[in-house]
Image (spheres, helix red, strand yellow):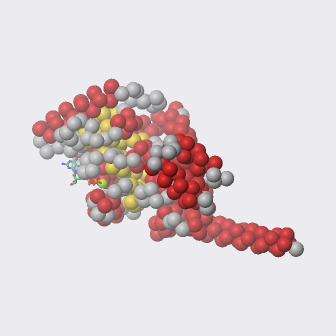
Amino acid sequence: MANDLENEARQRALARIREARGQASQDADHRMGLLAAGDRTALARAISLVESARPEDRAVAEALLQRAASGAGKALRYGITGVPGAGKSTWIEAAGLDLIQRGHRVAVLAVDPSSSRTGGSLLGDKTRMSALAQHPQAFVRPSPSGQTLGGVAEATAETALLCEAAGFDRILIETVGVGQSETEVRRMTDVFLLLLIPGGGDGIQGIKRGILEWADAVWVNKADGGPERQEAAKSALAIYQGALSLLSAPAEGAPPLFGTGSARDAAQVRGLVDQLEARLQVAAENGQLQARRKHQMGASLEALLAAESLRRVRNHPDFNAAWRRLQDEGQHGQILPYEAVRRLLEGLN
Ligand SMILES: Nc1nc2c(ncn2[C@@H]2O[C@H](COP(=O)(O)OP(=O)(O)OP(=O)(O)O)[C@@H](O)[C@H]2O)c(=O)[nH]1
Ligand SMILES: [Mg+2]
């Protein structure tokens, strides 16, 4: 009798799950159709959906992302990083307009790990990239920072997938190169540009060593407005080049490009875009691009696994009590952190 009731309840629950999945799948099909037709409002809505923390949205978002992922991989992703005010948005605007002239459709995702920094960067970026933001072949959008499972990189990668599904084949991702997000964003871009400015003090301007090591191109910006500025940019570049030559050579790919220039000078930006596009083409032909993406996929899986494991542990019904107990013991020096974690995990089965 009890078994029958349990069975019935289980069947009903399964039916509800199936129905919800069916609805999510229909909803995703509909949204995918709009995206494929290049509907920008649908793209903006799809991005909000993917950024949403509500579980019911997540089901549709995942179904949509699955559809977007099949057939994806042709869009090329640029990462542009650098200290605040280095000229990233200015460079992106010029590069984006240039890529459009070459026949591409350009999406810009601005990852802002500290939106408090500018008090709302969307407005700032849209006004700084006004020509690009208004262009019918472009889409400019800030990306969330770390709300979603897996953090900035996963959220940005998902947004990029949606942009690709909507027909954007060049995706430019702006990050500030002093925090955590740029190392993550490096994991999901095909080419990585580091923008620096002259006279930044002690050489590396708080940019983390890994960033300098990973860059496919290092460009000292604002080399304009007179010979003095150009000299300053050149000597800054020499310092960065020297610093980089002390570091180990990158395992794969060609050595980084180095240059100075002005993001306000369209011809100079075009010159760099030429070089980056050429590198991307070579990398696609000799398999390096695919190898890089495979490596990135591995890193993404690890990040997701870590985030999901942590989420499950934290959501365990016994977690809070066990956690408090261990913290108390730890505070009194009775237990080593490693031992505490082991005991905590053992207690959650
Ligand atoms: N002289 C000169 N000014 C530049 C150049 N590039 C950018 N600027 C100016 O520098 C300021 C900051 O430029 P942005 O492009 O907004 O810099 P950003 O790196 O995107 O800044 P955040 O997003 O706030 O980190 C703006 O006033 C730009 O006009 C350049 O090559 N030369
Ligand atoms: Mg900017």
Q: Position of residue 179 (x, y in %)?
A: 36, 48
Q: Is residue 145 left or right of residue 46?
A: left
Q: Position of residue 196 (x, y in %)?
A: 27, 42
Q: Position of residue 209 (x, y in %)?
A: 35, 36
Out of 5 and 23, give the one closest to the viewer.
5
Q: Is residue 321 visible?
A: yes
Out of 332 and 269, give the one closest to the viewer.
332
Out of 299 and 107, give the one closest to the viewer.
299
When the figure is inspected, residue 259 is found, relative to residue 346, above or below; the finding is: above
Question: What residue sits 39% from the left and 47% below the top?
Answer: 180
Q: Is residue 16 left or right of residue 336?
A: right
Rendering quarter of residue 259: top left
When the figure is inspected, residue 241 is found, relative to residue 222, above or below; the finding is: above
- Which quadrant of the figure contains the N terminus? bottom right
Question: What residue sits 59% from the left and 56% below the top?
Answer: 312
Q: Position of residue 23 (x, y in %)?
A: 66, 71
Question: What residue sits 33% from the left and 46% below the top?
Answer: 177
Out of 38 and 18, give the one closest to the viewer.
18
Q: Is residue 233 left or right of residue 148?
A: left
Question: What residue sits 58% from the left and 66% below the top?
Answer: 55
Q: Is residue 126 visible?
A: no
Quadrant in which ligand 2 is drawn? bottom left
Number of callouts in the render?
0
